[in-house]
């Protein structure tokens, strides 16, 4: 699985929360609302959580190993620090649009 797009939205005035990121994997799967956080020693990311899961300290989306977490974190933080969003040059084979029912549908050819 490859990160094909990263979009970062910095937040001004946040003490610990510095921004939000969205990543797209293989031009097909989007993970929204990844928090960019200033920790004690360095910056890190926090994947989205459900409010009920927050009580248990569980993430909605969780990388299954440290290597992939570190890879995604380094790409997001690089994009945050440089202020440049990341786009993979390869074009997706199929483009999707978000329907009003929150289901992904193939876009129509015009």
Image (tube, rainbow, N blue to C red):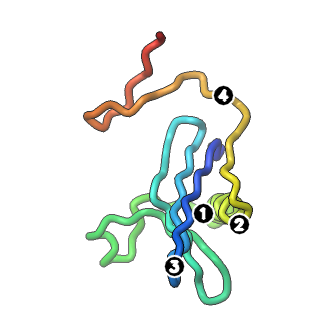
Which residue is labeled 1 in the image?
65
Mark with earlier residue (3, 4): 3
Mark with earlier residue (1, 2): 1
Tag nearer the camera, 3 or 4: 3
Q: In this view, does 16 lie above or below 102?
A: below
Which residue is labeled 2 in the image?
81
Which residue is labeled 4 in the image?
91
* Res. 83 image quadrant: bottom right
Tag nearer the camera, 3 or 1: 3
Q: Residue lying furthest front in this view? A: 12
* Res. 25 image quadrant: top right
- Asked which secondary structure carries label 2, the reply is helix
- Asked which secondary structure carries label 3, the reply is loop
Crowd band around label 2 with a 10 angstrom C-alpha radius: few (<14), some (14–19), many (20+):
few
Mark with earlier residue (2, 4): 2
Residue at left offset 46%, top offset 53% = 32
The span from disc 3 to disc 4 (Cα, nearest Å) is 36 Å
Disc marking residue 13: 3
Locate residue 57, reporting x and y percent: 38, 76
Residue at left offset 52%, top offset 69% = 11
């Amino acid at each position: 699985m490859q990160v094909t797009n990263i979009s970062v939205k910095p937040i001004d005035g946040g003490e610990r929360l510095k921004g939000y990121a969205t990543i797209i994997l293989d031009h097909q799967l989007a993970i929204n609302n990844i928090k960019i956080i200033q920790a004690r020693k360095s910056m890190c990311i926090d994947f989205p959580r459900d409010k009920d899961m927050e009580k248990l300290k569980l993430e909605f989306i969780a990388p299954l190993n440290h290597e992939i977490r570190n890879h995604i974190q380094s790409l997001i933080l690089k994009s945050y620090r440089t202020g440049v969003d990341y786009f993979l040059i390869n074009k997706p084979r199929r483009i999707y649009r978000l329907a009003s029912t929150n289901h992904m549908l193939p876009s129509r050819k015009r």
